[in-house]
Structures are given as structure tokens and as C-alpha cells.
Image (cartoon, helix red, strand yellow):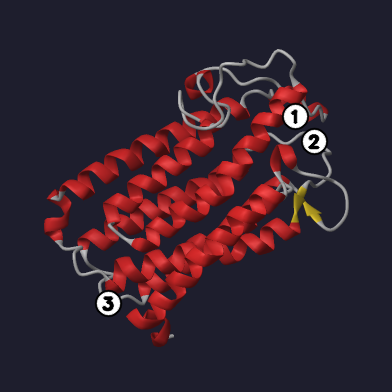
């Protein structure tokens, strides 16, 4: 396992990861990833949204923990802070978020196993590239880093993005009442409030905002990869979701942007 912690191997994997992110971008524009609103019951193995999301995100936590605990700086203060940030973030995305989903009772699985399996490579790379750098290869993560403007600004951006993400997810979740869920009614409504006033996909915007902040705070190319590969997946999907709303709701607000308030 030590060879995976070496700087030489890490750099090769990092380069390959960015190439892979480019391939994901091309694929995301060519085809819709079958999950969520864009999920399908046709063909292949489909899981429940809760299980599919949990399984897809799980490697990000497991791989980060594994490689972090093998790092020579794992017991230092700054790496431990980033360990906490990572566990909170992916604890929310991989455990709390799917647990709180309001999936209509009796709904057939729409989360393709293909999405889960293809997501495993990405989320494993998320954990590996960040844990190895933070706990083993970085040289700047001393106590002095806590007063560095990059750490302070990055964490401020990250926290804002994380809180906006939780708020946006809550708005979407509450569009479907618990009573409708129990009755098996798969109801869709136009979301209102918060950043939904300005964009169709505030959850995606805030997720990318969080990763931007994390990349600045860690000053790590591994974190930049997480941002880039997430953008490669979420930007094309944001346009697909925006189109879905426009087609489903004739009265959908025409002034809403796709992803970035007042810009895109």
C-alpha cells in the first residue's frame, strides 16, 4: 500500500484523473445520467434512490479514511480539521441526504446500477487524492496555515456553500408532503424560495461552491480534481434538469437561470 502514498504514483494518478474528468464532461453532454428526475425504469438493474445514492457516495468516505489513517501527518491539527470537514460533508451527502429523501411509497427503482458502479471510481479518487495529499504529501499544513488567507477565505466559501446546499435540498424535499409519500403519490412542483428564486439548480451551484472553497482552503490539486469532475457532471446535468422543468411546467419562471445567479 505504501507505493500508493508515494508522490510519483500520486502525480500519475492525479494526471489520469483529470483526463478522466474530461471524458466525463463529454459523456455528460451526450447522455443523461439515469437517476433523480432523469431516472428511468427501463432496462438494466435499477435501485431505489436511497440505496443507489448511498452506495455511490460510500467510497468517498471509506477511501478517504483508509488513506488518511496511513498518512504520516494524520495526527496533526490541520489535517485533522480537514478530516472533520470531509466526514461532515460526505456524511451529509452519503448518509443524511439519502435518508431524508421523500420517495413515494411503492415507487419502482429508478437509480441505475450503471451510475452507481461508474460513480465508484470517481468517489474513490475523491477520497484517495485528497487524503493522501492532506495527511501524507502536503508540506504547508502546519498550525500557521490556520491564519493563512487561503485557509480563511476557502473555509468561508466552503461553509457558505455547504449551508446553502442543505437549505436547497430541504426546499426540494419539502415539495412532496409526508402524506403524499405514504400514499405513493409521485408529485412534482416548481420549487420556490432561497436561491430557487434565481436558478433552477441551487443544489448544484452550492455543491460547486463548497468544492471551490475546499480547494482554496487545502491548496490542493486533489481538491481541484473534485471540483473539476463535479463540474463536468453537474453543469451538463443542470441544463438537462432546467429543460425538464420547462417541458413539465408551461408556467415555469422564464427569468430563472440554469446554475449561476444572474449569469448562467
Which badge, 1 or 2, is on the more N-terminal residue?
2
In space, the residues marked 3 and 1 are separated at their CA atoms by 48 Å
**Nearer the observer, disc 3 or disc 1?**
3
| Residue sitting at x 75%, y 15% | 250
Q: What element carries label 1?
A: helix
Taking the spot 56% from the left edge, 32% from the top edge, the residue there is 201
Residue at the extreme right = 43
Q: How crowded is mark 2: few (under 14 residues within 10 Å), some or many (20 or more)?
A: few
Residue receiving disc 2: 105
- Residues at circles 3 and 1 in contact by the CB criterion of under 8 Å: no
Residue 106 placement, left or right of 168: right
Q: In which quarter of the image is residue 234?
A: top right
**Which residue is the site of mark 3?**
72
> Is disc 1 in contact with disc 2, using a CB cutoff of under 8 Å?
yes
Q: Do the residues labelled 3 and 2 touch (CB within 8 Å)?
A: no
Residue 27 percent location from the top left of the image: 66, 55
| Relative vertical location of residue 99 with respect to residue 78 in this rendering, above or below | above
Which residue position is annotated with label 1? Answer: 181
The answer to whether residue 188 of the structure is visible from this angle is: no
- The answer to which image quadrant residue 185 occupies is top right
Q: 249 or 159: which is nearer to us?
A: 249
Secondary structure of the residue carrying numbered label 2 = loop
Q: Nearer the viewer, residue 61 or 260?
A: 260
Amino acid at each position: 500500500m505504501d507505493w500508493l502514498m508515494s508522490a510519483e504514483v500520486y502525480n500519475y494518478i492525479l494526471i489520469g484523473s483529470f483526463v478522466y474528468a474530461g471524458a466525463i464532461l463529454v459523456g455528460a453532454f451526450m447522455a443523461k445520467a439515469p437517476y433523480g428526475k432523469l431516472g428511468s425504469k427501463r432496462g438494466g438493474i435499477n435501485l431505489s434512490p436511497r440505496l443507489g445514492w448511498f452506495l455511490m457516495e460510500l467510497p468517498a468516505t471509506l477511501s478517504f479514511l483508509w488513506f488518511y489513517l496511513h498518512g504520516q501527518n494524520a495526527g496533526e491539527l490541520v489535517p485533522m480539521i480537514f478530516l472533520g470537514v470531509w466526514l461532515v460533508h460526505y456524511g451529509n451527502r452519503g448518509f443524511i441526504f439519502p435518508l431524508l429523501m421523500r420517495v413515494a411509497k411503492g415507487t419502482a427503482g429508478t437509480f441505475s446500477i450503471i451510475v452507481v458502479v461508474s460513480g465508484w471510481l470517481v468517489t474513490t479518487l475523491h477520497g484517495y487524492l485528497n487524503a493522501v495529499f492532506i495527511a501524507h504529501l502536503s508540506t504547508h499544513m502546519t498550525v500557521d496555515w490556520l491564519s493563512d488567507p487561503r485557509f480563511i477565505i476557502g473555509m468561508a466559501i466552503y461553509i457558505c456553500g455547504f449551508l446553502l446546499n442543505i437549505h436547497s435540498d430541504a426546499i426540494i424535499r419539502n415539495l412532496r408532503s409526508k402524506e403524499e409519500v405514504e400514499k405513493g403519490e409521485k408529485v412534482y412542483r416548481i420549487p420556490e424560495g432561497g436561491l430557487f428564486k434565481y436558478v433552477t439548480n441551487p443544489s448544484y451551484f452550492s455543491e460547486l461552491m463548497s468544492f471551490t472553497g475546499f480547494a482554496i482552503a487545502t491548496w490542493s490539486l486533489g481538491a481541484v480534481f473534485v471540483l473539476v469532475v463535479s463540474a463536468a457532471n453537474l453543469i451538463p446535468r443542470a441544463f438537462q434538469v432546467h429543460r425538464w422543468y420547462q417541458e413539465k411546467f408551461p408556467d415555469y419562471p422564464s427569468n430563472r437561470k440554469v446554475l449561476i445567479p444572474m449569469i448562467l
